[in-house]
Amino acid sequence: LIIFLETSYNYSTMKNIEAVYRKGLRAYDRGYFEDARENFGQAMHLTNMRTDENMIIACRELQHDLSLGISMTFCGQRNSKKAIEFCDQALRIAQYLSDTLRIAKCQHQYGEIKIMKNSFRNAMEKFKESLKLKLQAVGDNNLDVADTYHSIGKTYLYLMDLPKAKEMFDKSLKIRQRILGDHDLKIAQLYFDIGDLCDLEDKHDNALTMFEKSLKILLMTLGKNSLDLAKTYRAIGWIYGYYLQRGHDARTMFDKALKIELNVVGESSLQVAQTYYYMAYTYYKEDNINHSLPLCFKAANIQLNLQKTCYFSMANIYNLLGHCHKNQENYDTAQELYNKALKIRKQLFGEKHLSIASIYDSLADISIGNEDHENAKCLAEQSLDIREDITGDNSIYVAYSHSTLAQCYKAQHMYTKAMGEYHKALKIHQDIAGDKATIGIANVYYNISCIYGLQNLLTKEIHCEEKYVDICKQIHGENRINIAKSYRNIGWNYCKLQQFDEGLAYYQKHLDIVLQLKGNMDEPRYDAYISMAQLYNRLKRSKDAIPMYEKALHYNFLIYGEIHEKRVELYNQLQKIYRQENNQHMADKMNKLASDVKRGLRRYHRSKEPLL
């Protein structure tokens, strides 16, 4: 009876310790690292109180698992020193137990710490060492083995070896689905990384599907307040904003992510910095640099305060800041920022990595802006060499390099060579996409149309830009500002060909879209009304031209105010039309309004003159 009671007591105590440990694991899964560590610490304290010889092995095993759990929490908080300390402690216990599987788990954790420190090749060594031990200990059909396949896949993803990443993800998914079914947290985490892989492969619809599958499982398993959930909202927002041009929907996702991150880890965290970066990139894609830059600075300041200066996401921030300054034609500043990003990426990945190639493309654009065409071509060729070495000569990334080379030739007015590079890019995009419409194909058609425009081959320009529009409509629908701009350009080209009815039809399409779009659309609407007014005027349709000019005046006021040179031009144009219509009263009125604005302009300029 005494033996039975002692055994029952020990069994009950160990169950209590395991319950506290599992509570810690649940907190860790949600991203509550402090709470998780507190639970692991409590459980560790209870195991240290057990002195029974018959429980020593079980206690040691739990102490290993708890030490490893504590290391994981520090890893989640980017504290490598503490993460290593507790992983070392776990390894000593595993070696004392001669437990091959637990030794393998420690090697896996060392790999995760290496990932945190951006030491990806060293991480790969640790993961492969872990995998070898796990296969020896438990065979292939085991969740611990699936974990390491998953981590190896993520490491290949960092190293941009996409086929090997896919192979590892497929192995992990097969094991996990066989053991866990399709609605477990680990399945959700794997779906997320497969979504990342699809994104890098330019398969953005597939990426969105994977992120949404991950989101559904996370909501079922973790509820509405976990870091994994925030990360998934952020990824969905990225697809919406960067590829699908659904800026409003993207910001809704980012706001959800930010709310969770601020609640779980607070403002000064890499997770919040990453969300600010994604928000900034979405504004950049909308050509809204004034909103993008402050968010970039927020993200950068958080990282710098955390002393994470040589970190992959810091390179991304420098890269985006470079894009913003390049768009504003601040080429020197942009080049400095790109070089900072390049330095970090070379430290992390070496000379040959796809992220290095993308910066060479950006630096080539800077050289084109500075009219340093030889350097631009050299950078574009370096980018192409890296991409062909890593991905072969028929990948989406190689297509990007051919487009950059085409830009170099275009800047030198070498249109035949530029067209050749664009057609190489187009063929690769089409080979990869098959019958599917993609933005990559659309963009190449647009660039080809620009070459035809520079050669004054207007019919061919129209044909290619119409292809661009048709593909964009298939992907995004018609109500997009880029489609509106293309309608206007196509209309202008028809007018140059003296095909005014076709030109007018496209101008009307341009106007219809910009009137429907939300946000700050004053300038696009002003441009649309001006285009319509000028064409009606050219066609001697004064009654149609006048209301177009009047609406242009309205948006001119919203943009520039009452006193502006363009307002004088509009009043003068209306004055001419009214005179042609023999409406002297309105002509005189327009003349007076133009004179009033001119006087206002003279007063303004005198107020700016320096005093003698």
Image: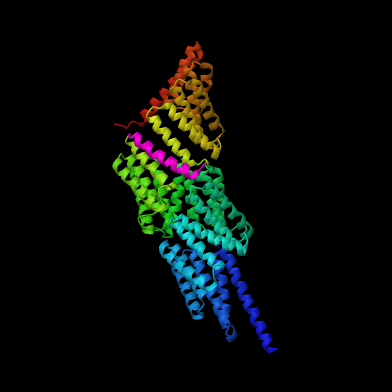
Dominant secondary structure (helix, strand or loop) of the stretch shown in magenta: helix
Between 26 and 498, the residue placed more toward the observer is 498
Can residue 52 be seen here? no
Residue range corresponding to the magenta coloring: 413-434
Picture quarter containing residue 214?
bottom right
Residue 233 at what x, y percent from top left? 56, 52
Between 292 and 538, the residue placed more toward the observer is 538
Q: Is residue 528 above or below residue 401?
A: above
Residue 295 at what x, y percent from top left? 46, 49
Q: Which residue is rendered at x = 50% and y = 56% of the image? A: 166
Count of labels in the image: 0
Which residue is most to the right? 1
Residue 350 painted magenta: no
Which residue is most to the bottom? 2
Picture quarter containing residue 192?
bottom right
**Render colour scheme:** rainbow
Residue 570 at what x, y percent from top left? 46, 22
Can residue 600 be seen here? yes
Picture quarter containing residue 262?
bottom right
Which quadrant of the figure contains the C terminus?
top left
The reply, left or right, for residue 461 in relation to residue 68 is left
Q: Is residue 577 above or below residue 514?
A: above
Q: Which residue is rendered at x = 51% and y = 70% of the image? A: 135
Residue 337 at what x, y percent from top left? 36, 49
Q: Is residue 300 above or below residue 564?
A: below
Which quadrant of the figure contains the N terminus?
bottom right
